[in-house]
Image (spheres, helix red, strand yellow):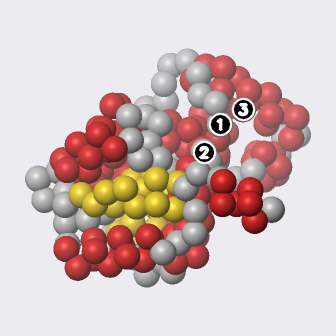
Amino acid sequence: MAGEQRDRPDVRVLIADDQKIVREGLVTLIGLLPGIAVVGAAVDGDDAVRQALELRPDVVLMDLNMPRCNGVEATERLRLQRPEVAVVVLTTFSDDAWVFSALQAGARGFLTKDAGPDEIRRAITDVAAGHAQLDPSVQRRLLDALGTGNRFAVADARGQQRPGDPPDELTPREAEVLAHIAAGLSNAEIASTLFVSEATVKTHVNHIFAKTGLRDRAQLVGYAFRNGLASPG
């Protein structure tokens, strides 16, 4: 078992933060985590995109509030130019507009900067494996928004609010199911919320996968936020 662990390739991580002391601290901290290798450190969003294209990391740990090109814009550029690279947002910003904008842009994970080493390692390894990883407080706010029936107003890279409309190929019920997936609900939880059978939910999920061409729930989360699908119907 120990030999298998040593033979397993490390998750390659690029760190992006404009504050030197924070950036260097993260390089040191994350470099000590088992199974993770820091391959670069970027000073802003432009630098993060450039280094990601050159170094091909598995995960970018991305700050949001950076000069010239912020983390939301950099995340969206990476989604378009290097979609296989997963982005985990690590920031002091917990404002809903920033959170939802980062997820809409394609971020797979979201952590606040008071996260401990174990939380950071788990987020990095989870998104590298194709899963979504959200801070519990973020998931609670998504569920609260769903519970009140509010649509999520999200900001673009310039901070302007923009509503999202369901894409034409999804039915209202499929959009509703997708909204609950984006909030982190399981099929069983969605079935309970919508008062339908779990088999019915699975059918809707299969239709969503077929129509969107996506492969897993983590990708559906990003798709939902990119298209403004974050509330029922």
Position above or below: 28 against 89: below
Cα–Cα gap, marks 2 and 3: 17 Å
> In this image, 1 relative to 107: left or right?
right
- Nearer the camera: disc 1 or disc 3: 1
**Disc 3 secondary structure class:** helix
- Give the side of residue 162 with respect to residue 203, left or right: left
* Type of amino acid at the residue the image marks with label 1: Asp
Q: Residue, x 58% and y 76% (percent of image)? A: 118
- The residues bearing labels 2 and 1 have C-alpha atoms spaced at a distance of 8 Å
Looking at the image, how many numbered discs can be counted on the residues?
3
**To which residue does mark 1 refer?**
216
The residue depicted at 19 percent of the width and 60 percent of the height is: 43
Residue marked by disc 3? 205
Cβ atoms under marks 1 and 3 closer than 8 Å: no
Looking at marks 1 and 3 on the same chain, the residue that comes earlier in the sequence is marked by 3
**Residue at the disc numbered 2:** 130
On-image quarter of the C terminus: top right
- Which quarter of the rendering shows the N terminus? bottom right
* Labels 2 and 1: the sequence-earlier one: 2
